């Protein structure tokens, strides 16, 4: 509901348009919040993932990186930190689940405090730290 309100706020012409689908699944977030591209020349399988909310620009960049890797071209794109990397693994369950649920709740409370011009929750620094690491 919050995202729908924001969409209508940003694009007022959508007021009254019915949203037929909602996203509410798990967050596809890499452990270190860093996008990554990987190409295995043996299997010829390439992946690009971990866009962390920056999908439009990152999709373009990772597509160019993957093309460079697949075609085995020499390019400065090969030196980017997102190239040929894998994210660290998440903590084991149930610790991962607890941390993700805490972060989702904390960021919601931080957003609500900002929307209502209230002081940030006392645990805001913890959530922001977790969001960076």
Image (cartoon, grey):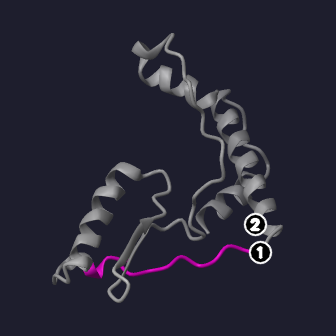
Horizontal and vertical percent position of residue 10:
44, 24
Q: Quadrant of the C terminus?
A: bottom right
Measuring from the top left, give residue 86's x and y in whole percent: 49, 79
Res. 62 image quadrant: bottom left
- Secondary structure mainly formed by the magenta segment: loop
Residue 38: percent from the left, percent from the top? 39, 77
Residue pushed farthest left?
74
Q: Secondary structure at mark 2?
A: helix
Can residue 76 be seen in the rendering of this structure?
yes
Q: Which residue is mark 2?
A: 96
Tag 2–tag 1 contact (CB < 8 Å): yes
- The part of the chain drawn in magenta is 78-92
Closer to us: 59 or 6 = 59
Magenta-drawn stretch contains 89: yes
Measured Cα–Cα span from mark 2 to mark 1: 6 Å
Q: Residue furthest top?
A: 16
Q: Is residue 57 above or below residue 38?
A: above
Q: In the rendered view, does 19 fall on the left or right side of 71?
A: right
For label 1, the SS is loop
Q: Which of the labelled discs sits on residue 38, or is there none?
A: none
Quickly name the residue at label 1: 92
- The N terminus lies in which quarter of the figure? top right
Observer-nearest of 94 and 121: 94
The structure residue drawn at horizontal position 67% and vertical position 63%, both measured from the top left corner, is 130
Q: Is residue 120 magenta?
A: no
Q: Position of residue 68 (x, y in %)?
A: 21, 75
């Amino acid at each position: 509901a919050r995202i729908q309100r924001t969409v209508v706020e940003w694009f007022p012409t959508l007021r009254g348009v019915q949203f037929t689908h909602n996203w509410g699944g798990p967050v596809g977030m890499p452990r270190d919040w860093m996008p990554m591209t990987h190409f295995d020349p043996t299997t010829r399988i390439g992946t690009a993932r971990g866009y962390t909310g920056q999908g439009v620009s990152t999709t373009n960049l990772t597509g160019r990186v993957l093309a460079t890797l697949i075609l085995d071209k020499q390019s400065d794109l090969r030196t980017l930190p997102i190239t040929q990397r894998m994210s660290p693994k998440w903590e084991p369950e149930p610790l991962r689940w607890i941390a993700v649920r805490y972060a989702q709740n904390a960021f919601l409370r931080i957003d609500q405090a900002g929307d209502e011009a209230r002081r940030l929750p006392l645990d805001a620094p913890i959530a922001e730290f977790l969001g960076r690491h």
